[in-house]
Image (spheres, helix red, strand yellow):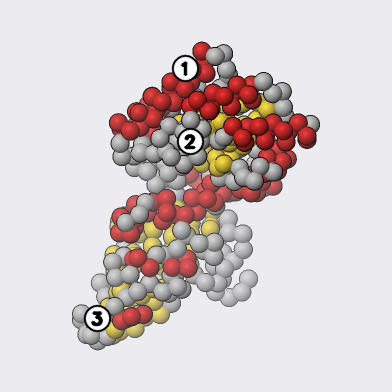
Amino acid sequence: MKSGALRFPMSPKPFLRPTWAEVSLPDLRSNLKRLRRRLPARTRLLFVVKGDAYGHGALACSRCAQGSGVVDWLGVSSVEEGAALRDGGIRLPILVLGSLYPFESFRAAAFYGLAPTVASLESARRLAAMMRRLGRRAECHLKVETGMGRIGMTPRSALEALGFLSSRREVRVGGVYTHFACAETSRAFTEMQLGRFTRFLSAAASLGLRVGIRHAANSAAAMEHPASRLDMVRPGLAAYGLYGGFKPVLTLKTKIVFIKTVKTGTPIGYGATFRARRRSRIATIPVGYADGFSRGLSNKGSVLVRGAKCPVVGNVAMDMTMIDVTRAPGTHVGDEVVLIGASGGQSITAAEMARALGTIPYEVACSISGRVPRVHLP
C-alpha cells in the first residue's frame, strides 16, 4: 500500500485523497429490522435501492438486506440497476419501479429475472408480445396513477390492461401499485389517493381479476398512514436513517489539508465573498461541489472539527472548501472533518443540510458523487 493511503475493512481499494463516505451496514440492518417490527406480520417489505441506494452503495446495501432475513423485495429505477445487482449475486425479487422504454428493455428485464413496471396499455401489449417471441413467462407489476402525475395508468386503463394481461399465459401480474405524492405533508391528499387506489382494487375484484401484491406506501406513509400498508411497503428514507426515528447510516468525512492564520479583512475564495471579521484560522478541506458538497453551502454551511461546529467561509469550489476553525483550538493538518454525521456530541444531519439548501434529504444523499469512495463498515 502506498504511504498515506486510507484503508478500511470493507473498502474495495485504498484511496489517497482523504474524502470518503462511511456506510454502517449494522445500522442499516437495524433500521430494516425496526421497520419489519412496525409492520403487520403479513405485510412484505420492499427495500428501495435505486439511485445507488440513495448514494449509499446499492450492491453492498442489497447484500446486507438479503442477509437480514426481513426484506422480501428490492426496488430499482432501471434495468441497468437491477442487472448490476443480479451480476453481484443478489437473488431477492427485484421490481423495476421506472417505466421501461424503449420496450426492447423487456428482453433484458426477462433475462435478468426482473419484474418490470407496466405503466400503460401499450407497454402491457409490448411486454406480452416480447415474452411470446422469447418463449418465456414474465412477472410484472401494474402502476396506477392516483394523483402523483408522473407515470401510471388511470384506473379505467389499468383495469383494461389487467384484463388483457390476465388473458395472456406469457405474463403474470404479480402486483399493482400506486405512488403517493404528499405522504410527508398532506394527510388529506394521501387519503384521497388511497381512496382512488382502493376503489380500483374493488373494481378489479368485482371483475374477478387477480391483482397480486397491492402496494402504495413509502417510508412516511408506512409510518404515518397504517391503512396504506396493504400487502407491501416500499421504504427508502427510513431504511437509510433519513427519516425521523431511524438511525442515519451514512457519514461523510474528509481531512484538513492546509491551515493558515489570516488577519482581519482577508478575502477567502472565489469572488472574495467572505472577508475575515477578525484574526482567524482558516482551514482548507479537499471536498467541493464535484463531490456533492453543494456550492449552495457557501458562507452558510457548517462542518464538525474536534466536536465543534465550524462555518464554511467563502464559496465552495469544485474540489476544495474553506472553513473557519478559530473556535476549534488545537486543530492541525490531518484532523478529521465530519460533513454529515456526528462528532463530540454535535451532529450535522442530511436533513439539516437539506434545509440550508432549500431541498430534501434525498437530494443531499444522492448528490454525493461517484468519486467519493464508499466504505461499508461491517
Taking the spot 48% from the left edge, 30% from the top edge, the residue there is 154
Query: Do we see residue 126 in this rendering?
Result: yes
Taking the spot 41% from the left edge, 65% from the top edge, the residue there is 293
Give how far across and how far down residue 202 sits, in percent.
47, 17
Q: Residues within 10 Å of mark 3 (few under 14, many from 20)?
A: some
Q: Quadrant of the N terminus?
A: bottom right
Q: Secondary structure at mark 1?
A: helix
Give how far across and how far down residue 274 sits, in percent.
27, 78
Q: CA distance from mark 2 to mark 1?
A: 22 Å
Q: Which of the pair 65/220 is nearer the observer? A: 220
Which of discs 2 and 1 lies nearer the camera? The answer is 1
Give residue 355's quadrant in the image.
bottom left
Reading the chain from its start, which is encountered first: label 1 or label 3?
1
Q: Are marks 3 and 2 in contact (CB under 8 Å)?
A: no
Which of discs 3 and 2 lies nearer the camera? The answer is 2
Q: Amino acid at mark 3?
A: Ala
Give residue 171's quadrant in the image.
top right
Q: Residues within 10 Å of mark 2 (few under 14, many from 20)?
A: many
Residue carrying label 1:
202
Residue carrying label 3:
276
Q: Which of the pair 366/92 is nearer the observer? A: 366
